[in-house]
Amino acid sequence: MFLNVILIIMFFFNNVVKAEYEKTFYDLNIESITGEIINFKKYENKAILVVNTASYCGFTSQYEELQELWENYKSKGLIVLGIPSDTFNQEKKTNQEVKNFCEVNFNINFPLSAITEVKGDNAHEIFKWAKKNHGKSAVPKWNFHKILINKEGKIEDTFASFTKPMSSKLIKKIEGIL
């Protein structure tokens, strides 16, 4: 009886999603902060760190480490992709304001998307794709949530907002897939 209860609990609370990947990350695209379409096909065979960002968040200082990560690993095949989002009501109102904020305060030159929804029914297809293929851990709980895409265009791992971009945990995963 006790074993049956345990098995039932494990079944209902198991958050593992069988990733079937009808599409890979490289089949998707997003509008850039300047209005062009970023076609992820151009990133094939590269690892991508997708981060939903915000200008007024307690984690905004992570922009500095994201830029450092980009500078240290772009020549080895890492793309850092910032996706500004007002999903948690902490982003500026226009793409131009976000772009200026990032350039002036953090000297950001890695790719940034237009301001984008990252959670719920209006989430961008990237985040719906991530949830479908990796489960709830791919859904941002807050700003600066990180999704690491491997060179096959599949989710390697996800990292909560508290995980800093230059943390040994994240660096180890990145180096492992580059």
Image (tube, rainbow, N blue to C red):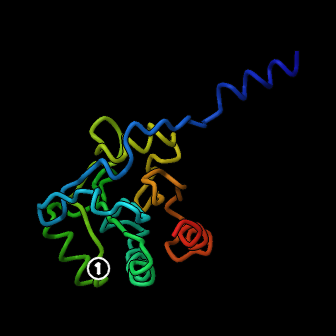
To which quarter of the image does residue 114 belong?
bottom left
**In the rendered image, the vertical position of residue 101 relative to residue 81, given as above or below:** below
At horizontal 68% and vertical 25% (from top left) the residue drawn is 11
Q: Does residue 31 show up?
A: yes
Residue under the point 42% across and 53% down: 153
Quadrant in which the N terminus is drawn: top right
Left or right: 132, with 111 as reference point? right
Q: What is the x, y in percent for residue 99?
A: 19, 72
As drawn, 27 above or below 19? below
Query: Measuring 45% from the left and 84% from the top, which residue is drawn there?
Result: 72
Q: Which residue is mark 1?
A: 108
Q: Secondary structure at mark 1?
A: loop
- Report crowding for label 1: few under 14, some 14 to 19, many 20 or more residues within 10 A (C-alpha): many
Query: Is residue 146 among the parts visible in the rendering?
Result: no
- Residue located 39% across and 78% down the image: 74
Determine whether 38 is above or below 59 in the image.
above
Q: Amino acid at mark 1?
A: Ile
49 versus 3 height, above or below: below
Quarter residue 177 falls in: bottom right
